[in-house]
Amino acid sequence: PGKIYAFQVRARTAVGYGPYSGKMYFQTLTGGEHSEMVQDRLPLIVGSALGGLVFLVIAAIAILAIIFK
């Protein structure tokens, strides 16, 4: 986590290799950033799960009401 990587690329053709590109730097997420992302999404996950549960309960009540009516 938090490592910086540098990349250079070059093309290979029938006549050989071309020049390297400029360096491009990328950094991986730190451990804290990953846990913050999960914490930001936790209310959405819990809300979706509870919404699905409420839908199933209402559907079950409606089905039971139709069957026993």
Image (cartoon, grey):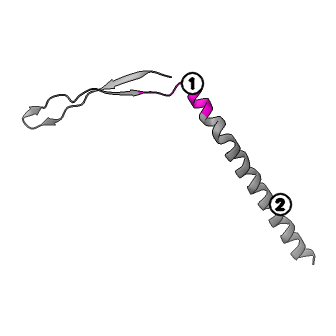
Q: Earlier in the sequence, mark 1 or mark 2?
A: 1
Along the horizontal axis of the image, is 64 left or right of 33?
Answer: right
* Mark 2, other Cα within 10 Å: few <14 / some 14–19 / many ≥20: few
Kind of residue at badge 2: Val
Which residue corresponds to mark 1? 31
Q: Main secondary structure of the magenta part?
A: helix
Which residue corresponds to mark 2? 57
Report the quarter where the C terminus lies. Answer: bottom right
Foreground residue, 41 or 52?
41
Q: Residue at 23%, 28% (x, y): give it.
A: 22
> In this rendering, is residue 34 above or below 44?
above
Kind of residue at badge 1: Gly
> In this rendering, is residue 66 above or below 52?
below
- Secondary structure at badge 2 equals helix
Along the horizontal axis of the image, is 1 left or right of 63?
Answer: left
Between marks 1 and 2 in the image, the one whose residue lies nearer the viewer: 1
The residues colored magenta run 27-36
Q: Is residue 33 magenta?
A: yes
Q: Residue at 73%, 46% (x, y): give it.
A: 46
Q: Position of residue 41 (x, y in %)?
A: 64, 41
Q: Residue furthest bottom?
A: 69
Query: Looking at the image, do the residues carrying marks 1 and 2 touch, with CB atoms under 8 Å apart?
Result: no
Rendered image quadrant of residue 26: top left
